[in-house]
Image (cartoon, rainbow, N blue to C red):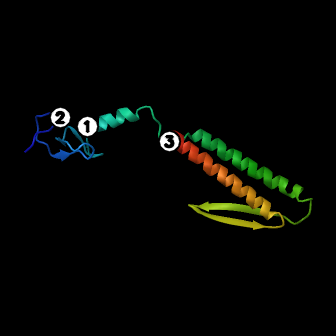
Amino acid sequence: MTLCVFCGRKNASFVCHNCGRMACGECFDTSRWWCTNCANQVASMTEGKSSRVPASGLLFLAFVMIFVGMLLITIGPLLNGGTTGASGGAVILIGPIPIILGSGPLSDVIIVLAIVLTVIVLIFFGLILRRQR
């Protein structure tokens, strides 16, 4: 049997998937399948970095978007000249597949506005994810 590279006292029974060195059960982290040396190095490198999106910023953005949507729903009939014909439109993203809906005489304008807002939100989320790296 080969001795543990780290402590040199016990027989090595594990091989680190990160560095390939052989380790005993005390010098090995079975949850990650890494030696404790590699696990400690990764922990020290990632210390102080947050891997989560700031929830308060996303919550604020969601409330702003809901408020703008309700404001557009309220102002929409006024912009239509007070006629009874209502217009509406929406863009629904299910993964990468957009579903575009619309009805009424001004649905084209509302759909374009919905597409622009969707692209702005996707760019915003992309920038947040890029900034975290």
Q: Residue at x 32, y 34 (%)?
A: 41
Task: Kindly check if marks 1 and 3 are in contact, taking CB atoms under 8 A apart as contact.
Answer: no
40 shown above or below 102: above
Residue at image location 82% in from the left, 67% down from the top: 104
- Which badge, 3 or 2, is on the more N-terminal residue? 2
Residue 99 percent across, percent down from the top left: 65, 65
> The disc labelled 1 sits on which kind of residue?
Thr
Q: Earlier in the sequence, mark 1 or mark 2?
A: 2
Please tell me how many numbered marks the rendered image carries: 3
**Image-based side of 23 in relation to 33, left or right:** left
- Mark-to-mark CA distance, 1 and 3: 25 Å
Residue beneath disc 1: 36
Q: Are marks 3 and 2 in contact (CB under 8 Å)?
A: no
Is residue 132 shown left or right of residue 86?
A: left
Q: Label 3 neighbourhood size at 10 Å, few (<14), some (14-19), many (20+)?
A: few
* Tag of residue 2: none
> Mark 1 or mark 3: which comes first in sequence?
1
Of the 4 image quadrants, the one containing the N terminus is top left
Q: Residue furthest left?
A: 1
* Quadrant of the rendered image containing residue 89: bottom right
Say which amino acid is labelled 2.
Phe
Write down the residue under mark 2: 6
Secondary structure, mark 2, is: loop
Label 1 crowd (10 A; few <14 / some 14-19 / many >=20): some
Amino acid type at circle 3 is: Arg
Q: Secondary structure at mark 1?
A: helix
Q: Is residue 74 left or right of residue 44?
A: right
Question: What label sits on residue 52 in the rendered view?
Answer: 3
